[in-house]
Amino acid sequence: MSLRAVIYARCSTEEESQKDALVKQAQEAEEWVRKKGWILVDSYIESRSGTSTKNRAEYNRLYGDLLRDRFDILVIKSQDRLMRNTKDWYLFVDRLCSAGKRLYMYLEQKFFTPDDALITGIKAILAEEYSRELSRKINNAHAHRQKTGRAVILPSNTYGYRKRPDKSVEIVEEEAAIKRRMYELCAAGYGCRRISAILRQEGVCNRKGKPFADGDILRMIRSPLNKGTVVMHRTHYDFDAKRTVAIPKEEQYWYENRIPAIVSADLWELANRRITERSGKPREGQRYSGGTGRNPGTSPLSGKLRCGLCGEPYYRKARRRYKDRKIIYEWKCKRYLEHGRRNREKTRSEDGNPTADAILGCDNVHIRETDLMDLLRQICEISIGVDQEAIIGKMMELLRRILSKSPLSNKPRPQRPQREAFKKQMTRLVDQLLDGTLSDAAFETKKGELENTLRFLRGRKEQENRLEKGEKARRFDDGNVPCGVERAQEKRLLALETKMREEEMVRQAAVAQMLDETEIIRIFPRYMEVIFLKNSSRANHDHCMKVEYGSLFDTAEQKREDREKLWEMVRTNPGLTAGKLAEALGISRWAVNYGIRVLKKEGRLYFCGKGGKGVWVAKD
């Protein structure tokens, strides 16, 4: 029986000369497969750096296929074609040997064996050191070229510009006109999402024929390149960390008027000032944290949820439920909202290849807000130990103790200081009359006014006394249930206690406190990661918390689980009707009928009987 073989070919850059070398490398590997008499079942070919396995789609596909029964032999040119990283090499060899696969390097014309582990390990170390030295030289050359500013580093996909063969930059007027339109709309007060919608309505698309995403528009407006300013030395690739790090602004190189400007400096400044103002200004009815540059939105979850698959934020969307028109709030990935699902069959072109939407889409789950809040309440009860009944009981006891010691809210204030003041005024009037400084008529007028005021104050004092005596008399014999004002207070306290218990105010407050201390929540199909702020109370012992929720938000998986339960119930109780099955499973009758249709189509369920009389039979 012929052995099954696959080939892996890689070149480190995407230049045309390297692409030709990549084709030649793949042809050589295929020729060796034919020479050995093996059957070629697959090819893994890519043009990526070998210093890291990140973003190497073909390598990661090969690494995963090692655990599957798809091939017996892997053919490569040499060891450094797989990777130039010691750790990744040992991980690959470990999986290769565990899976019982063989590795053939045709440049040396030999198979890898466990006895070669020491030699290949040394080769991996040397290859990694070579890559590190090469990276250091390339970074130094880039930094020197950027510091002198001799040549403008312009990506080939920069919208609105084109690089000439002599390395000068020119404006693509058709694309520049669209950019100017973006700046004008932004300066007029429109946000990036609104600008995206306006351009979509006008039929304006990017180079790929797709509408502009709001994130792309924001990056274009923020880029100083459009006003002719070139910024160099903004990022640096850290070889040891295997990632690109940002360079501080003071260490970057700024060259003004280096390339032709698409917009004027004034328009650029105005548009960017509008974006800055919008980022810090809350909308009507929204909270504002102040100084964070982030609009927290109307929900405590706003700005917290982020997709764990593609890294995009989650947006809140509302829809009405069909049966009762109730508003349902769901959180969906931004990339899904713009491009749909990633692996949809209907997003394939005529040649069978995925379209741009299929590649840019996202397959992550949608989050129902009510279910997520219930999940967060459960987390608070488990991790913090929130006892709602005990907390409500202590709060009500404290309120009753405070109110029992406070005076009645409608009890009149003592009027003695005012009566004493009026008596002093009457004494001064008599003295003025005796001294001859006040006429008799003026004395009588002032005296009448003061006597009326004193009469009014005496009446209020008598009313005060009657109210106090009445409050003491209007009590029940047992002295436990108060009347009057105290009865109204007790009624309000009971209403408050009922409302706190029905609306779960304590649990909501605990969740709100938890979200205030949360920096981000990464959403995955089966679990989420809650990452707390560094200065929060949780950061000292549990900075990141992983929460498993299974198929809680996976509707397709829930339906599959319901079908399995339905099949098991039909198998054990074949005489149950659809109504009884729905009642036992806790789902609707429509869902039961749908599950029966799917199981019947799969051949796992069939009806035994005629004329509507009979039973459903489950097949193993």
Image (cartoon, helix red, strand yellow):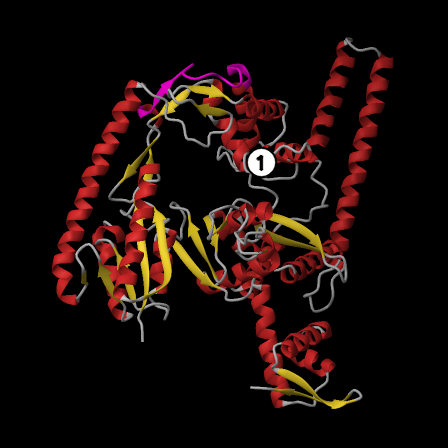
- Quadrant containing the C terminus in the rendered view: bottom right
In this rendered view, identify the residue nearer to me: 422 or 313.
313
Picture residue at 55% right of the left edge, 17% below the top: 267
Give residue 125's position: percent from left, percent from top.
16, 50
In this rendered view, identify the residue nearer to me: 86 or 337.
86
Q: Is residue 573 magenta?
A: no
Determine whether, in the image, residue 545 is placed left or right of residue 117.
right
- Quadrant containing the N terminus in the rendered view: bottom left
Q: Which segment did they paint magenta?
A: 251-267
Q: How many numbered badges does the structure rendering display?
A: 1
Q: Check the image and name the residue furthest to the right.
A: 441
Picture residue at 80% right of the left edge, 29% below the top: 453
Picture residue at 60% right of the left edge, 34% below the top: 205
Q: Tag 1, which secondary structure?
A: loop
Q: Which residue is mark 1?
A: 212
Determine whether, in the image, residue 247 is placed left or right of residue 552.
left
Q: Is residue 214 visible?
A: yes
Picture residue at 48% right of the left edge, 57% below the top: 524
Give residue 342's position: percent from left, percent from top.
53, 53
Say what amino acid the circle numbered 1 marks.
Answer: Phe
Q: Residue 40 occupies which quadrant of the picture?
A: bottom left
Q: Residue 163 occupies which quadrant of the picture?
A: top left
Q: Residue 281 occupies which quadrant of the picture?
A: top right
Q: Is residue 259 magenta?
A: yes
- Classify 10 Å Cα crowding around label 1: few (below 14), some (14-19), many (20 and above): many
Give residue 292's position: percent from left, percent from top.
48, 35
Q: Is residue 42 above or below residue 197?
A: below
